[in-house]
Amino acid sequence: MRPTIQAPVAKPRPTSRPKVAIIVGSTRPGRKAEAVAAWVHALAAPRDDATFEVVDIADYALPHLDEPVPPRAGQYSHPHTHAWAQKIGAFDAYVFVTPEYNASVPGALKNAIDFLYAEWNGKAAAFVGYGIQGGTRAVQHLRQILGDLEVVDIPTTVALTLADDFQDHTDFTPSAVPTKSAALMLDELVAQAARSKEAGRSL
């Protein structure tokens, strides 16, 4: 009697964890974005389904957009643009931490986004806004901006208000509601990042 030969069991292909950048979206002296980004990172760091890194646009000293060729062409000519592109292109998803200035996003953040194109494409993004009204209008504009860059935005948003989440409108003291929202936001973001990453690998 011949022995039964079993077909080898296919092992699932290993996949690396998505990499998520927590972007500090303000360069203003005395900004609150650093503390908020550090809070998001502290909430995210214990997770084992993604890796997280705080990326501060202030560290890249980007001038007002000075590339002679539109970013969609991918023909970057300045060292600061190449450095920024290399950093942003290394991530699969982003958490944008933004204040609201005059019902919109800070100019420095808009400028940093405008420097690049392909590095954003097909990625996922989530938003943490702060301000008198929770930065909601800034987040709304960010969704529109990133939509034009073919970025998939996450439904859940964290809205931090100066009255409820900043002692004396200054020191960051997040309440329970945004902390719960942040956990849900991270769940959605990591899941979408994994899907987008797999879709890009399958192309």
Image: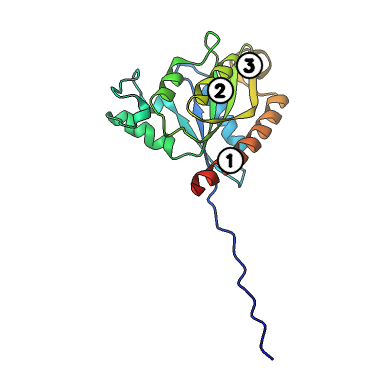
Label 2 sits on residue? 143
Q: Which residue is mark 1?
A: 45
Residue 173 in sight:
no
Disc 3 packing (10 Å; few <14; some 14–19; many ≥20): many
SS at circle 1: loop
Q: Earlier in the sequence, mark 2 or mark 3?
A: 3
Which residue does the image show at 59% across and 20% down from the upper left? 129
Q: Is 28 situated left or right of 70 in this image? A: right
Using the image as rendered, state which of residue 112 and residue 144 is in the foreground: 144
Kindly tell me whether residue 145 is visible in this rendering: yes
Amino acid marked by disc 1? Ala
Instruction: Please state which of residues 153 and 17 is positioned toward the viewer in this rendering.
Output: 153
**Residue name at image x 49 percent, y 24 percent:** 148
Please report the residue visible at 59 percent of the width from the left and 24 percent of the height from the top. 128
The local secondary structure at tag 2 comes to helix
Position of residue 103 measured from the top left corner of the image (x, y, whole percent): 55, 10
**Where does the N terminus fall, quadrant-wise?**
bottom right
Precedes in sequence: disc 2 or disc 1 = 1
Task: Nearest to the eye among marks 2 and 3: give it.
Answer: 2
Q: Amino acid at mark 3?
A: Gly
Q: Name the residue that disc number 3 marks.
A: 134
- Amino acid type of disc 2? Arg
Q: Secondary structure at mark 3?
A: loop
